[in-house]
Amino acid sequence: MTGLLVLAGTPIGTPDDAPPRLTAELASADVIAAEDTRRLRRLTSALGVTPAGRIVSYFEGNESARTPELVDALESGDRVLLVTDAGMPSVSDPGYRLVAACVERGIRVTAVPGPSAVLTALALSGLPVDRFCFEGFLPRKAGERAARLREVADERRTLVYFEAPHRLDDTLAAMAEIFGGERRAAVCRELTKTYEEVKRGPLKDLAAWAAEGVRGEITVVVEGAPRAAAEQPDPAELARRVAVRESAGEPRKAAIAVVAADAGVPKRDVFDAVVAAKSSRRSG
């Protein structure tokens, strides 16, 4: 029988966030593939666990070469645990090639869920969370970065990015230029760590703040593009659509949710339109 590949999320800050299953997997895996074996040793020491299996490095520089080796181990029946420095493997970290190879060979893949900088930053940002997209790291070169940003300039979903601290000021300045300086954003720094900080404000203000220098692990959350005035649905029309669905027997809460999704607006906007329509009918 073939083995099992386990993708394990690791703490993005304090080791106390490690789930119990991570400790168990670290202790029992036949092979642990780690992005940085030194960081792995620090994590296992903090968790008080001694790995019984073989530890190998698995990072961007050797990912292509080491993947066949790990697939061989899996096909021999080994349980292989894949961990990165922080967060979930494959999400802007090594792992995709190994998962794809396992899927192609019919090797089972599972995961130990863990902390996520993407979801943590999104939740703390104060920006809409009902629809979002993760854009990872932007290109380092200014021209390529600007081109990538222009691709999503009209994206109405909330955007989430990773960024290196020494490039943050340039990235925020480019975002302010392309998205507009008044677009709201949040810079989340050192999440769950001692010096955790969430800086919120318009992109132009955040760019000025970052120009003074910022340290630590950075996640940037940017508000989606505003709907053009001509595209804004008429509140009366939203209320009418809800009324039609209600008359067909659909509960109001469900009708509001469907109408909001179809119109691409927050449910609160549809609810307010329904309340305003009822008030208008009463006063009339």
Image (cartoon, helix red, strand yellow):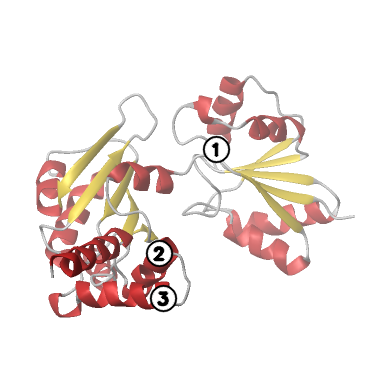
Give the residue pinned by disc 2.
252
Judge whether residue 247 can be spotted in this image: yes
Q: Amino acid at mark 3?
A: Ser
Where disc 3 sits, the SS reads: helix
| Residue where numbered disc 1 is placed | 10
Q: In this rendering, would 267 be left or right of 69?
A: left
Residues 189 and 128: in front is 128
Residue 48 image position (x, y, % from top left): 63, 19
Query: Separation of disc 3 and disc 1 at Cα?
Result: 50 Å
Is 122 left, or right, of 79 in this rendering?
Answer: left
Disc 3 marks which residue? 247
Where 228 sits versus 16, above or below?
Answer: below
Task: Identify the residue at image location x=58%, y=59%.
Answer: 96
Q: Which mark is residue 274?
A: none
Distance between the Cα atoms at labels 3 and 2? 10 Å
Query: Which mark is first along the chain, 1 or 3?
Result: 1
User: Do the numbered discs 1 and 2 sit on residues whose CB atoms are within 8 Å?
Assistant: no
Q: Position of residue 130 (x, y in %)?
A: 38, 57
Q: Secondary structure at mark 1?
A: loop
- Residue at 41%, 48% (x, y): give it: 118
List x then y, in percent, for residue 234.
19, 76
Q: Nearer the viewer, residue 283 or 197?
A: 283
